[in-house]
Image: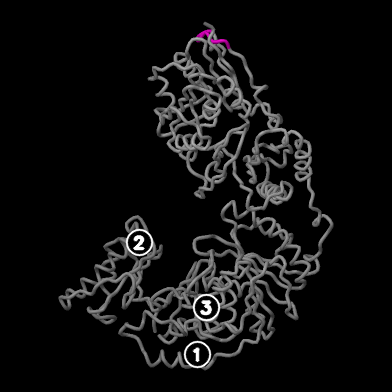
Amino acid sequence: MYDFLVTTSKGLEQLLQQEIQHLLPELETNNRPGQVMFQGELKDAYHICLWSRLANRVLLKLASSKGSSGDDLYDLANKVNWSSHFSPDQTFSVDFIGANRDINNTQFGALKVKDAIVDHFKDLYDQRPNVDKHQPDIRFQGRLNRNGMSVYLDLAGGSLHQRMYRERAGQAPIKENLAFAMLMRSGWVDEFNQGHIKPLYDPMCGSGTILIEAAQYASNIAPGLYRERWGFENWKGHQPELWQSMLDAAEIKQAVPGVALVGTDIDARVVHIAVKNANLAGVGQFIRFECADATKYNRDMNKPGYIVSNIPYGERLGELTQLLPLFKDWGFHLKESYPNWKLSLLTSNRDMLRQLRLVATKEYNFINGNIECQLVNFELDEKNCHISENDRQQSSDFGNRLRKNLSKMKKWINSQDTNCYRVYDADLPDYNVAIDRYGEWVVVQEYAPPKQIPQHKSIARLQEVLIATPEIMGIPPEQLVLKTRKVQKGKAQYEKLDKQSNEIQVYENGARFWVNLHDYLDTGLFLDHRITRQKVKELSKDKRVLNLFSYTGSVSVFAALGGAKLVTTVDMSNTYIKWAKRNFELNDIRGYHQFIREDCLSWIRNCEQQFDLIFVDPPSFSNSKNMTGSWDVQRDHLGFLKMVRKRLAPGGTIIFSNNLRNFALAPELAEETGLKIQEISAETLPQDFQRNKKIHHCWIMTDGD
């Protein structure tokens, strides 16, 4: 008799225990998270290796102790008679699971076991076996937990979820054992075992794993039957005759499944992969795969069955904007076309399933790879399939307001020489977003909701915005970009949101600009400064212009187009300086202009040049690593503008702007600088930003000499 440990994904241990008890009813088993333990004979372990559809590894215990240190682990491993398990001319590897204060990483734990194995052979034979991490002859595993430490022989030699039929997979593949767990939790397996043979349909089948697992189960094909390598094959305790007899018996047990299995996917490429994988698994003739849209596919199965699918999760915001309207349409289709069916969907985004407008009967927590997921079960009964007029109603308070805004703005939009403008800015308190158009794209910026608003309500309202906006704005859902505005701290102020590097060109009053809608919180063009940029252009003729905190240089572009004889663009970000140069190239601006990458505070302090027009639009706050200290516009603007004043040529002009909503200009600024100061905030506010009078503050300051 041996002690065995069978591992699986966390959340599947109860199912694995049920499966082992079904395969070997005479065994007594118990479970812990992600594992099942039992005592049995070698034939029991072979049987699980061959027939378990849920296990990852089958481990045979070689030794255990209550120790916890690295020395304890070495001593434990040193007690094992390794030469009774393999020879010094064979290769081996050691995996290690667990960590504590003394054994603080898995590499250290594996090294301690490996050292004990090598020392054993050196002492006995003055010869050491070689380590092969990729394809060893035999594999061992050390495990550490609160109860102590153990050393095991890995009988499988690798994870059993790898059935060897999946040469290729789709974009978000599901492990084979998790796919079978979904079938068990859906109820399909239980009904099949009871003789109630129900059709199975996977509408977003990807590479076909769920249906292949179902077909192999219905055909009584042992999941380990075609595995090419086993960990026990080079083990001295292996019983090859017993193993071969079990393989032969498994071959005889195969049968025709007699169940309708259908898979569809909108991607023809992955459908082709699914067909190939099913053929490799020996069940290709039992599954019908088609390239089809799940929201329109009409079944031809003659009785209700099960829909089981690993749906797209919408992990990326861009994917979410496309999936929300799709799931809303799919919900209607399911209700109309699949009455009395049962539905089981795996997702990491439970909120997205709310678009189906279905009431769930049960939820199970799973781990797919390293992603926490829920398997959500629904019954498409009469109550769930009822479609009310409210469900079909496409309008909402938000949708009605957005349509109204567009209608009121239509004449103004047509009169403007730009394809970038704001159409909505938290007009309704319950829909706390801003919506901007950039050419054929739309950007939705979600403001952080008040703490008193329940999270599920804010999510539901945002989803409503993401569904309605593409339809009303007349764009495909994939051309909607979602961003979340919240207080940024530390390095998060400067980190990329994404890495898509998708840029588009937009235009404004005779100028063109590159904008990046995906990778940063801001796009590269502040739309509320449209009129301010025009004012700079009007004042720039034959002037020496300085643009401080230049961002992507849009103001510099207008200064150059306005006839400035020199434009100096200063920003501490190398990314923004390069971006500004590209905007100059895009507008075919030639001649000598300066682009300086430096902290504006340090640069202005040391600058000796004079400028006729200076534009200053600093951030509200910054503590970039490129700065000495931090910047707070309320605290620091007086001292900074004093330095700027020293660089202003006689008769020159400063335009000072910022976006801190509660900003107040220092009252002593005029007296201490001798500047004539006039606030022009209202007249620089474009019509599409009139909803929010404090979107920015702006002053024009002129030399009084």
From the viewer's perspective, is residue 542 above or below residue 212?
above
Residue 267 in the image, given as x and y percentages of width and height: 60, 67
Mark 3 Cα shell of 10 Å, populated few (<14), some (14-19), many (≥20): many
Q: In the image shown, does 232 or 266 lie closer to the viewer? A: 266
User: What residue is drawn where x is 66% and y is 26%?
Assistant: 685
Q: If the image is split into quadrants, where does the N terminus sit? A: bottom left
The residue that label 3 is drawn on is 53
The secondary structure type at the circle numbered 3 is loop
Three-letter residue code for mark 1: Ala
Can residue 81 be seen from the camera position used here? Answer: no
Q: Viewer-proximal residue, 304 or 367? A: 304
Image location of residue 296, percent across then percent down = 72, 67
Crowding near pointer 2: few (<14 within 10 Å), some, many (20+)?
A: some
- Is 672 within the magenta? yes
At mark 2, the secondary structure is: helix
Judge whether 537 appears above or below 284 on screen: above
The residue lying furthest to the top in this view is 705
